[in-house]
Image (cartoon, rainbow, N blue to C red):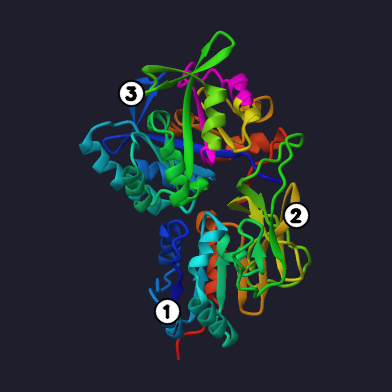
Amino acid sequence: MLSKRIIACLDVRDGQVVKGVQFQQLRHAGDPAELARRYNTEGIDEVVVLDITATIEGRRTLARTVHAVAQEIFLPLAVGGGIRTEDDAATVVDAGADKVSLNTAALRDPALITTLAGRYGSQAVIVAIDAKRHGDRFAVYVRSGQTGTGRDAVEWAREAESRGAGEILLTSMDRDGTKAGFDCELTAAVSAAVDIPVIASGGAGTFDHFTDVFTSGRADAALAASIFHYAEHSVADLKRHLRNEGVPVRINW
Amino acid sequence: MIALVDYRAGNLTSVRKALTALGADFVTPAFADELRHVTAIIVPGVGHFASTAHLDEAWRAAILERVAAGTPLLGICVGMQWLFEGSDEAPDDPGIGLLAGRCVRLRGDTERRVKVPHVGWNALTPPSPAPSTLLAGVAPDSQVYFTHSFAPPVTGDCVAATTHGQPFAAAVERGNVFGVQFHPEKSSDVGLQILRNFLSTVRPAS
């Protein structure tokens, strides 16, 4: 049976891992390669490096960071944040990324999804969607959550799939960094609408939050950052908990 | 020296990294006749079966000749599917036909929440207690990383099956021909062990 994946996210700025609350108030959390090595030992299933620097200087640092992380792990490695062109994607793929995650650029230029899927295969293209509740709907935001787009998250996920995306990385902006639990309604709505895997993100605080998002949230994978970075909880303990709850996970690594 | 065949199906960075970590010497030959000088051949691949069309008659003849001479061959993902007669993903592009059977599309099932593509970690189940070269030292039900929509059938050559809606061949062996549908280079220690097992079949150049 296909396991539910636990993904560690490294939010990287200027080569260092940082973590904020609801996309603000950043604090330092360590060296990316060192964290990746630790997560690998603990049994993480996948790693995402998310570049939250927007400067040209920062982009050069990113390729070095991706290379350093890739040297530590024999696991799928996804890279996102500020990938706007085919060349940006090629830079991180050449540095060792298996997948690229598109966000703002995919909305501005949806053809980029198809271009990258054609060049690297759909399995290499993640479309990241940052969504916020508006009544009973979910609105898509871009530019690190600063700008509304008028798009509906479920409808945009469907379009991304039809254009060649291989996975959806779905972040609840309302829950990001709050440790109040994943937005299971948002996740279930998107997961039911597409055939490609949906990675839930934003709000992980307890082990039961993961159980919830894998059951009522219908997530294929769950991503978290701060819950792991500060060693509040180990990945291994989380997986044992999930297994005891009847959620299929990879235990023997 | 091992040949890592680059036929422009995705990037080979991860495979290169894994082979380097295992201490293997490898080249990516530009021309098929360079295969004469290698001790093993790896055909990797992510993406679409149609990209195997880049492996033209010269490559096929060279690979078949080397396999007949006993050189170990490993196909990974699309590279494994290519070892079979063909795939429904690209019906006009034949495989090399070293293994019997055709690759078919996995069937999704919304009701049972089986999504296609099959992406993630899934278990390897040996179909019988028959000894396997690739799986030596790999615990039963070990998990490996998959990302694919098409898969080869379970035949007599299958040494590990995986089930995603339906069973398919996750690892095959027939003499010196080996194939894995998953990505050993992204499957952590289990994957590295499987690659190491393949490398253990490689005889030093005479």
Label 2 crowd bin: few (<14), some (14–19), many (20+), radius 10 Å: some
From the image, which quarter does the C terminus of chain B lie in?
A: bottom left
| Callout 1–callout 3 Cβ contact below 8 Å | no
Amino acid type of the residue that numbered disc 2 sits on in the rendered structure: Pro
The subunit carrying tag 2 is: B
| Callout 2–callout 1 Cβ contact below 8 Å | no
The residue that disc 2 covers is B167
Residue B1's tag is 1
Residue B107's tag is none
Residue B196 % position (x, y): 53, 69
The residue that disc 3 covers is A26
Q: Secondary structure at mark 1?
A: loop
Residue situated in front as seen by the camera: A167 or B124: A167
Residue A205 can be seen, yes or no:
no
Question: Residues in magenta?
Answer: A163-189
Label 1 crowd bin: few (<14), some (14–19), many (20+), radius 10 Å: some
Q: Residue furthest right?
A: B128
A147 within the magenta span: no
Q: As displayed, is residue B125 above or below residue A240?
A: below
Q: Residue furthest top?
A: A135
Marks 3, 2: nearer the viewer: 2
The subunit carrying tag 1 is: B
Measured in 3D between alpha carbons, the distance from the residue under mark 2 to the one under mark 1, in whole angstroms, is 35 Å
